[in-house]
Image (spheres, rainbow, N blue to C red):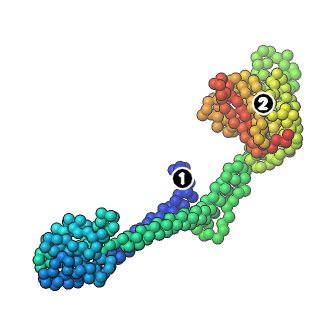
Amino acid sequence: MAIQFRRGVRLRARVTFAFGLGALILTTVLSIVTYLLVRDNLLETREQSAQSVATVNANQAQRRIIEEIDTGTARDLLSNLRGVRAESTPAIRLDNNWISADPVLFEAPGNIDAELLNLVNASESSGAKMRYRLSNGTPVLVIGFPLTARDALYFEATPLDDIEDTLNALSQILVVTSAGICLLGIAIGAFASRRLLLPVEKVGQAARAIATGDLTARLEVGRDRDLEQLTDSFNQMASNLEERIQADAKFASNVSHELRSPLTTIMASLEVLNADKNTFNEASSVALNLLTEDLERFRQLVEDLLEISRYEVNANALELERFLLKEFLRAIAIQSGHALLQVEFLNCDDQTIIEADKRRLARVMNNLLENATNYAGGATRLTVTQHNTDIEISIQDNGPGIPEEERNTIFERFARGAEGGRRGKGTGTGLGLSLVAEHLKLHGGKVNVRSHEDGEDGSIFTITLPKVIK
């Protein structure tokens, strides 16, 4: 059963983002609540203070205007009332005349909101209040009372700019604090995700090690009891896999070894028969040819199985030696029946020396050239290219090509593609390209296949080897 995970943002990034987002949401909510509580508290305190002072001043003005004071006396009255609370500016409407203690700061009736004026006119004694901004942008709290004597109105404006400045400073502090806590949350999230996902990373490293052939890779239990079950399950799975692979490899090796002895006897007997082939009739000669071809193919299959089994049990070791690449490739071309195939060095010195296992690399080149002969009519071009410290060897052909959907599977064991399903002369065992990949992996290299860039028929097999010496 395969468990699918949705591809997208990495898990560590999602955990870090969740911590940062959580910290941001938390600090934003706390900042908003703090701002609203401080604002309401400051405004409520200011309104209560202004309300009590304005009520006292309105009562004093009520008593004084009964004495039939004139405009000049009313101005003095407002100045005296302003002295009680210097930050407030009173204004009065007396006999349809508006008088303000400071027309510059609070001009009446120009700075009195029309809605507030209507509310005060409509009220009997309780008055009304309203917060708004003056024409110059100053926030104020204006409280108004109706005065029964002489149909007068009393207003008192208290500026709120100091509270606004305090709230602006508070909001800036809260924004900076929220940003800082958000960054701290991201940092904590990054640290926590790294610690939390460390076991997952170790599982991934162990899985990659097993995938690359290290069947001895295991997880350490450590002190975390919560991960003990995962560790035990993974290690048990790895042990079972190792035992199964080793058993299969041992079986393949034993079978191959057991087959070699009778196969050697049969091949020797065939040589005797082939020596007297001229004495056979036509039907017997045909049968002997078919038998010889199939036994040769069977012999190659046994040899390939033995080689594969050595990889399965990690019994292969490189025997590195330095040699001239051009001479090596030329000898391989002649040996494989491609004597006319020229070796071209495109952007590197033809005296390049590499360090590799000569026997295994020869097997790689022979398998690729044989594959080109069997399925593509033979190789047409052999090129060598150098990229930094890597060397690339490409074998081109003009055959039917390899479908794109098969290019990743032809290097699997017993995978011979669409053309490999037929039996007879010119067909392989299905292990040749798999051995190519195994030999190159042991060198730290790789192999791939692609089509011609100009759209021509055929394929290009490219092997990459590291560590160019010269």
Whether residue 133 is visible, yes or no, is: yes
Q: Residue at x 60, y 70 (%)?
A: 225
Determine whether label 2 and label 1 are within 8 Å by CB.
Answer: no
Closer to the eye: label 2 or 1: 2
Foreground of the two, 126 or 458: 126
- Distance from disc 2 to disc 1, alpha carbons, whole Å, reads 42 Å
Q: Is residue 425 above or below residue 163?
A: above
Foreground of the two, 115 or 433: 115
Left or right: 214 in relation to 233: right
Q: Position of residue 344 (x, y in %)?
A: 80, 28
Foreground of the two, 184 or 64: 64
Q: Element type at marker 1?
A: loop
Q: Position of residue 339 (x, y in %)?
A: 83, 23
Q: Residue at x 58, y 68 (%)?
A: 226
Name the disc covering residue 346, or none: 2
- The quarter of the displayed image where residue 90 is located: bottom left
Instruction: Tell me which amino acid carries mark 1.
Output: Val
Whether residue 33 is visible, yes or no, is: no
Q: Residues within 10 Å of mark 1 (few under 14, many from 20)?
A: few
Left or right: 260 in relation to 241: right
Name the disc covering residue 9, or none: 1
Q: Earlier in the sequence, mark 2 or mark 1?
A: 1
